[in-house]
Image (cartoon, grey):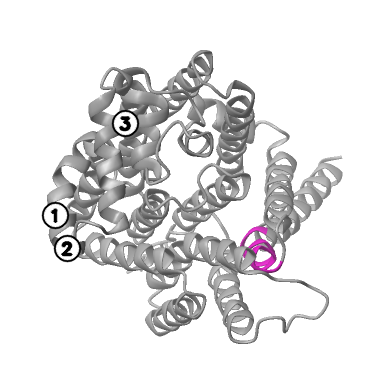
Amino acid sequence: MDRAVSQTTNVAIDAAALLRRFGFAVLVIMAPAAALLTRRGLVILVPIGIALLVLATFLESEGREPLGRARRAIVGPAGGIAAFLAFWAGLSLLWSPFPSEALERLVNLVGVGAVAFIAVAALPQRMRVSNLYLMPLGAGLSALMALWVGLRPGSVPGIAIDAGILDRGLLLLVLVTPAAVSWLASKDRFVSCFLLVAVVTAALIIGEAWAALVALALGAAVFAVATIDARAGRWTCLVLIPGLVLAAPAMPFVLRPLSKMAFGITHPRVEMVRSWGRIVYDDPARLFTGHGLDTGLRAKLAGLVPNSAPSGILFEVWFELGFLGAVALALLLARAVGAASRLQGGAAAGALMTLTVAFVLAVTGQGAAQAWWLVGLALAAITAVAVDRGQYRTTRPRTTTRA
């Protein structure tokens, strides 16, 4: 009887390991490649990979672990802040001029966030090294594919790849690169690490993804600082990420004279800063309540704000959700920075790099709150935590000699 139970348990563990390996391969190899070739491949493959990870953990723990971990994460401080942010975004539908579109966006945000919580909770406490080496493999193959598509457009038979699809794929490539780099660096694979960064950089240059290239460069700088001094890396991210969110309303008044000196009075960037400052100055009361979720872009299309108004998270969070939403987002980002800095070994520097890359892309208005962008952020979070789960060390028991 005991032998039968043991055999059944071993079969379940082996099946779970196979499912987890396949699910992780779907996430880090197939999904980034599909993002370069198709519009919907990413939003289809990532949920499939997450479902396989969750199923694998259910088999190992008889359904207890994923639910328990997700529940503990949701009821924690970060979960409480995220819940308040979702509540305030939902309440803003009452004064949003586009309530139906805003409701759809809110459902996407909450849904992807919940799935990301569950996926991270489904990761085992110890990730297999062989599974984690799939990350640099997937990032490298995707970068080579991006180079091929960028140098020879239309070279993939039977698949129509336009500039929009390639841009999306390059953004996702930048989001998953930090985890791959941090894993290689944690294993002292510095040559492979350099080659991966070089091929990703070449793909971004060929694809003219300048915002992604800037994000990768700033992320690499944060990675270097955090590797040398973990405390300095944490404070750099705290100033760069939640600090800028809180200071956003003052930025147009600070940047306006600087942009005039740098670009001239008639430059579009100067007009963008001028429009931003005029929006803040003309209706300061809205800095508290905001105009309602999903109004940043739609207000431009409807002619409610000038077309020269900026895009990106720094403007949109204050314009849409006001003071309370911006403070909640800043607190959530600060919690994320703190959690990333507490990860083990090189995983901390990689997680801070991931946060920096994602934030810089969000500031430049890449992806907004579209489904593929939210799914890409969830994938970046999963890979960052996976690197941390692979940082365990085993110690050989001490030998004793008898006299």
| Image quarter in which the N terminus is found | top right
Secondary structure category for the residue under label 3: helix
Residue that appears at 52% across and 75% down: 207
Q: Which residue is denoted by mark 3 in the rendering?
A: 331
Q: Tag 1: Cα neighbours inside 10 Å, few (<14), some, or many (≥20)?
A: few
Any part of residue 399 in sight: no
- Disc on the earlier residue, 3 or 1: 1
Q: CA distance from mark 3 to mark 1?
A: 29 Å
In the rendered structure, are the residues bearing label 2 and label 1 in contact, judged by CB atoms less than 8 Å apart? yes
Residue 77 position, x and y percent, is 38, 25
Secondary structure category for the residue under label 1: helix
Any part of residue 42 in sight: yes
| Image quarter in which the C terminus is found | bottom left
Residue 258 disc label: 1
Q: Amino acid at mark 2?
A: Ala
Q: Is residue 368 above or below residue 72?
A: below
Q: Quadrant of residue 62?
A: top right
Q: How many marks?
A: 3
The stretch in magenta equals: 27-37
Q: Which residue is denoted by mark 2 in the rendering?
A: 262
